[in-house]
Structure formats: C-alpha cells, structure tokens
Image (spheres, rainbow, N blue to C red):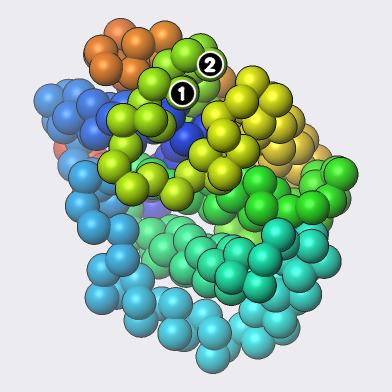
Amino acid sequence: MNRLLVEFAGLPGAGKSTLASAVAEILEDLGFSLATDPRSPAVSLPTRLTYVRLLASRPAFVLGSVATIARTRPLTARDLRWATGTWLKRVARLVQASRKPGIHLFDPGVAQALWSIGARSRMAAFSQSAHVLLRRAPRPDLLAVIDAPNETLVSRLRRRPGSTSVLERDTLSPEAIARGRQRMDEVLGALGRLEAGPGVERFVNPDAAQPSATARRIVDWIDDRVDFAPREASE
C-alpha cells in the first residue's frame, strides 16, 4: 500500500500546528493528496467508530494502557482521565489511518500523547512506561520533533487565550521548559528501543511566526522517504 504516516511532536509553543499546516500546503502544491490533513478536525466520525471498536475488541490493550498510565502517577485524577482518553483516541486515529493509502499528517499523534502523559507524571523517569505503552500500540513511519528557543516558546504560550498547557502550570520557567525537553527525550528514547520504530528527525523552528523555511526542510525530509509518486498516493 502507498502509505506514509507522519507525526509532529514537540513542546507547546514550538509551532507544531503552524508547521504542520505549512507542510500540508507544500505537499499539496507538489501534487500529493493528503489522506489525513492536520488542518481538518482531528475527531471525525470514522475515528470515533474506530475508537469504539478499539475499546470493544482489544480489552487487554485498553486495560493495560490504563494500568500503565496509572503507574506513571499522574498529578491529579483529572490528569489520569485525560491522559487515558487522549492516548486511546490517538491510537484509534492511527489505526484508522493505517488502513488508507496516501500521506497522513498528524498534529498531534501518539508521540505527543506520550509527552503529555509524561509531563503530567510525578515519576522521576518516564522512559520505561512510555516503552511499555508503545510496544502494544501502532506507531507512525516518521516523527518530526519540533523545538524552538525558550523565548519563542514563552512568547507564543503567553499569547494563547485560555491556554492550559502543562508548561504554563509551571509558570513557563526555564526549569519547566528543561523538564519538558527531558520528557521528550525520554519519549524518543522509548521509540528508539522499539524493533521497528519510526524515522525521527529534529527541527528547530527559530521563528514560529515565519515557518516557511522550516516547513520546506520538513517537506524535503518527507519527500526523500516517500517511495511513491504523487499520482500514486491515492492508489
């Protein structure tokens, strides 16, 4: 099947959504049809149906996920509910996309869900729990990890109306940002321990308001790994 699953991950404020949209536009200009478009609503009816089927058909996976997430010692009961629901919905979306040809862009995806679980965890080290969750779950083919200078992260998050980012809970301090990067490194470490993990590349987005140069680098990286022509993407 001519299919490529690409996820975007990174700290809040790094410009993931802006970059994902810019990458989608460039890929369309190159003639590729996007089977999953990051500019469209993440929760569609087919995804909801896949989520329900996942809960019904894979009870061991669901219960194992709940138990593993609970062992990460989330900060609050609300964090536990949110983390569990988010993880299962992202997995369901990836399962649904894996059945369709074309290029699929996810913002966010399972890697970002893992980061969010780790960011809400009271564990000193999160990598083992992330690895346990990933062993049982589908994964993307490619993962673009986006970062930005600290001042860019802080500026963007402060401009977001009503944002509830985990980093904002920690007052956007340099220490909080460092902890966020540590959690991302743990997620990437867990991915790297998989027998068939995704191809991972880091991209620094120095000016999140002007993403074109970074978006072009990501498109070149994706294009180098696409083994089908644009016209074949939907076949």
Q: Residue at x 51, y 64 (%)?
A: 86
- Amino acid at pointer 2: Asn
Which residue occupies the foreground of this view, 215 or 170?
170
Residue 90 position (above or below residue 122): below
Residue 6 position (above or below residue 156): below
Q: Which residue is mark 2?
A: 150
On the rendered structure, is 78 left or right of 32?
right
Query: Is residue 117 among what the camera can see?
Result: yes
- Amino acid at pointer 1: Val
Q: Position of residue 119 (x, y in %)?
A: 66, 46
Would you call the spot at circle 2 few (<14 residues within 10 Å), some (14-19), or many (20 or more)? some
Task: Give the secondary structure at mark 2.
Answer: helix
On the rendered structure, is 6 left or right of 76?
left
Q: Which residue is mark 1?
A: 154
Would you call the spot at circle 1 few (<14 residues within 10 Å), some (14-19), or many (20 or more)? many
Q: Residue furthest bottom?
A: 56
On the rendered structure, is 133 left or right of 44?
right
